[in-house]
Image (cartoon, coloured by chain):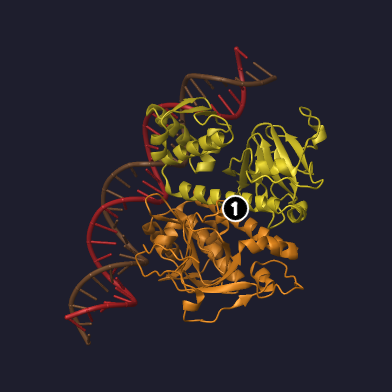
Chain colours: A yellow, B orange, C red, D brown
Amino acid sequence: LNSGSAATTTNSSFIQSAPSDCNPPAETLWSGLTEVCALLNVPVIQVASDANHAFQHIYLRSGQRIHTVEQTFEHLYLINSGYVKTVLLDESGSEKVLGFPMRGDLIGIDGLHSRRYPTESVALSDCGIILIPFKRVGWLGRICPEFELAIYGAMSRELAREQAMAAMLISLRAEAKVGRFLIALSERYAAMGYSSKQFTLQVTRQEIGSYLGLALESVSRVLSELHCLGFIAVDKRTITILDYENLRLR
Amino acid sequence: LNSGSAATTTNSSFIQSAPSDCNPPAETLWSGLTEVCALLNVPVIQVASDANHAFQHIYLRSGQRIHTVEQTFEHLYLINSGYVKTVLLDESGSEKVLGFPMRGDLIGIDGLHSRRYPTESVALSDCGIILIPFKRVGWLGRICPEFELAIYGAMSRELAREQAMAAMLISLRAEAKVGRFLIALSERYAAMGYSSKQFTLQVTRQEIGSYLGLALESVSRVLSELHCLGFIAVDKRTITILDYENLRLR
DNA sequence: CGGCGTTTTGAAGGGGATCAACGCCTGTGG
DNA sequence: CCACAGGCGTTGATCCCCTTCAAAACGCCG
């Protein structure tokens, strides 16, 4: 499972290892359909059978890879805790950030079609990930139609979100890009039950810039500018949203 | 079925009508699973049952809408013939082109999650579309696992393509955007069995620009420039690719 | 303390948007 | 038949937003 990995990042990154090698939570947890459906934000259905505890948890340290480019597609990964970035490596080897999935997001779908992941997902913090072996998805779908719908729904949600982001990123100015990025983050934190007013970025200006199609200096400049305008407060990587409406209208 | 439609485009656009109202091919065609799987580019499996001829065809004239924003999600649409644009309408009412799906592409997936389509798909030419009622997808998946895989595969393909396009569109210069757009078109035409060297754009410069995140003038300028460099020939909307390699390297 | 990665801020340059004018083609109506 | 209008495409001139290059402050960890 994921034995080969290119350690080309600047900061410390480790080969993903079997769960038993991870010290912090050494014991392996298992989740059932009910928990998985809840995470996917889909009507929870009690399944009669012994399909509970069918999904293995793995734990990753910050910097470890969930899956790498060209790795054989095998699982879908459902994020239970922690923060992740998904990147695409272009021909010159530099990485373009595609998104920052977090709790409740399903990643790895893009590898199904070609049976290999075209992207790479890296843990930005310690992470708890639920493995969903794709081979079992069809089988589970037959047992539990609600699960099938949950998977379809998650894929649809991902596609719609990707489309909306792409549209926004292409047509907006730098100020607006950063503004909407912060608002989107705020809403995601709110949906997870955290504060929507204040949160901590898990990423560098460089990574935000790569995601938004901006130079890291531009990200820094826009954050300073929004701070001067009184729309946000910036303290290192902690952002406080002070004027939601004006931020949205940028 | 799709009775309401906002006729706000500048050129003639019509309300989508029932197939029986369409004069050119007045008779309704039906496709079976085999044909649908072939279109989806998935290993074709002969299904034993009477599930053949389970999918209705509809025909649209150029300018008609396949589905509109906010319309209740009901079908997936598989393009059998013709050209389509999918657009997102922003708050100001102006449209942002998300893609140009064509034969073999599955559209409408993005409406599943919220049960309403967030986007609008417009026929750019006369089109033949196969309706796939989503209610029947789960049922068919149980009858024919290959069909289920085909749907999953199509969704995955769509997501991966969307990701790759978004990454490219954000980080490249105008020249490179147009170059890659033409190459992508060329490959799609090749996959459909048409010439990859010469083809006709079904879209205006305006629509290309919206898709690529460029002003229509920039699209025109780049096309002229690529023409001067001898990489392509441009005659109105007919493009001939003369130097594939140099075009790719832009 | 000293090195490194991150972040901030400044100055200069370029690429694309914007505004504007003109040619081309199609469809329309006198 | 021809004039005219309107959409589409091309090309030019100007401006400005963002990138790039550069330097320095900051925080972190050895």
Q: Is residue B236 above or below residue D17?
A: below
Q: Tell me the residue that label 1 is attached to.
A: A156
Q: In the structure shown, which secondary structural element does the residue marked by tag 1 occupy?
A: helix
A125 lies left or right of A229: right
Residue A162 place in picture, x, y as percent:
55, 49
Q: Quadrant of residue A82?
A: top right
Residue B127 place in picture, x, y as percent:
51, 73
Residue A222 place in picture, x, y as percent:
43, 34
B235 lies left or right of B110: left
Q: Nearer the viewer, residue A140 or B105?
A: A140
The chain holding disc 1 is A
Residue B221 place in picture, x, y as percent:
39, 60
Residue at 79% over, 36% down: A19
Residue at 46% over, 38% down: A178
Q: Quadrant of residue A115?
A: bottom right
Residue at 64% over, 56% down: B156
Q: Amino acid at mark 1?
A: Ser
In this rendering, does residue A219 appear at all? yes
Query: Dot 1, crowdedness within 10 Å: few (<14), some or many (≥20)?
Result: many
